[in-house]
Amino acid sequence: LVMNMDEIYNSIRDIREGMLVNLGNVKAKVNSIIVSRNRDANYIGRVFDELLDYMSLCYYEVKPIYFRLLEYTSTFDIELTNDYISIFNKMFDEKIRKL
């Protein structure tokens, strides 16, 4: 199966649109973590991982949500926060300063 560039573009666009629809669920998880003051590092790590997955096609939409969760985790778990700052920096070649 060979796809031309238009087909590839349309496939990526369709996947991205689906991801944006589902992003509301992940954003709700982040809001719930913060509002309930959840400190379960394993659960929060899974949500960070989910956000990183979304960033591959929805970077600008996810980045503020990711940063909001980093800000929250920095209030009680600097190691977790710094781990996910490092992962972000490596994946996206940006430099967020560790805490």
Image: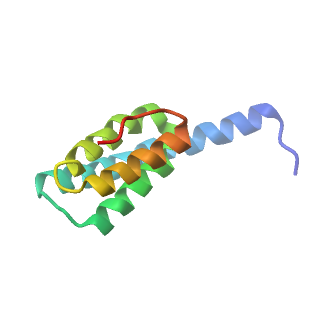
Residue 17 position in % (x across, y down) = 51, 40
Residue 9, by quadrant, is top right
Q: Is residue 48 visible?
A: yes
In the image, taking residue 85 as reference, residue 8 lies left or right, namely right
* Closer to the camera in the image, 62 or 16: 62
Q: Is residue 17 visible?
A: no
Residue at image x 59%, y 41%?
14
Residue 73 position in % (x across, y down) = 23, 51
In the image, taking residue 9 as reference, residue 15 lies left or right, namely left
Residue at the left extreme, as displayed:
36
Residue 37 position in % (x across, y down) = 12, 57
* Residue 25 to residue 62: above or below: below
Residue 74 position in % (x across, y down) = 22, 48
Applied colour scheme: rainbow
* Closer to the camera in the image, 27 or 34: 34
Residue at image x 83%, y 36%?
4
Residue 79, by quadrant, is bottom left
Residue 99, by quadrant, is top left
Residue at image x 67%, y 42%?
11
